[in-house]
Image (cartoon, helix red, strand yellow):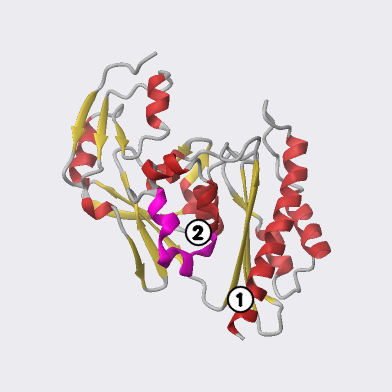
Amino acid sequence: MKAASFEYSRVADVDEACAILASDESARVIAGGQTLVPMMVMRLARPTRLVDINRIAELSYIRSDGDVISIGATTRQCLVERDALIAADLPLLARAITFVGHAATRARGTIGGSLANADPAAELSLIAITLDATLTYRLGGRTETIAARDFYIGPMTTSLPSGAVLTSVQFPKWPGRVGVGFCEVNTRRSDFALVAAAAQVELRNDGRCSRIVIGIGAVTDFPIRLTSAEEQLKSGTLDAATVKRAVVEALADVAPLSDLHASAEYRRRVAVSLATQAVADARSHAIGKTRDAN
């Protein structure tokens, strides 16, 4: 099978891309094409036009902007994986991105493409939700922003307005004694996650938790934060029993997905285990950093 016929436009700037998208609601942006192209080949997607944004140089960058790290939408995932700034200031992203697809797909796949695709199992969407990232897009000659928590509204569905182009994402930096943990379960390494969990903690000098975030992916229609568990665990020692109890309570009102890959009960049970492990790993990571500093 091959893709249905389509028109192709290689644009010079973001506003040109927006203008084309506004004039043709069936047009789609292409950068890495790691999801869109296979869907087109199987005719699950039939865009009338592809708008290629790869030559817009200002969309590919990694930089420190005050208290955030900004990443351009067309930045290749492999560059993020190898970047020293990401390793130093966004260790959770640095750890999670190694779980994204395969080395070959990370060489072409982009940060913005993964975020905008909104797959419930996508690691990058989970990290954006967990770290409370902000996404920036261009529409009608204006630059707008939206919080990651408001960006995802369903599986493969976002609140990005029609005709808009995602241009960047901003992840907040965490100062202090910070540790991270990331775990996922899948049928094979590099397959889509059946359940994923991410955690980042900041410890006080006495070893107690001063700040914590916990995210769960592939369990619901889009990644979620376990905010009630975070509130319970703040100022505590993050012992395993307390963490597990807080996670169980936080997931009590969550309705996990059930499909041919995993049942709802399996996803709930594994989410508890992975979230507990992610927090334990994050705590150990933070303690290890302190020992290294001493």
Q: Which mark is residue 289?
A: 1
Asked if the stretch drawn in magenta spans residue 81, the answer is: yes
Above or below 267: residue 226: below
Main SS category, magenta section:
helix
Closest to the observer: 133 or 275?
275
Q: Is 289 displayed left or right of 63 in the figure? A: right
Q: Is 108 displayed left or right of 269 in the figure? A: left
Above or below 175: residue 105: above
Location of residue 178 in the rendering, given as x and y in whole percent from the top left corner: 58, 72
Pointer 1 local density, CA inside 10 Å: few below 14, some 14–19, many at least 20: some
In the picture, the quarter occupied by the C terminus is bottom right
Location of residue 200 in the rendering, given as x and y in whole percent from the top left corner: 60, 64
Q: Which mark is residue 94?
A: 2
Write the start and end of the magenta stretch as one range: 77-92
User: Which amino acid type corresponds to the residue marked 1 in the rendered image?
Assistant: Lys
In the picture, the quarter occupied by the N terminus is top left
Pointer 2 local density, CA inside 10 Å: few below 14, some 14–19, many at least 20: many
User: Which amino acid type corresponds to the residue marked 2 in the rendered image?
Assistant: Ala
Closest to the observer: 10 or 157?
10
| Residue at x 69%, y 66% (from the top left corner) | 231
The residue sitting at the right extreme is 241
Q: Is residue 134 visible?
A: no
Q: Is 131 displayed left or right of 139 in the figure? A: right
Location of residue 180 in the rendering, given as x and y in whole percent from the top left corner: 60, 64
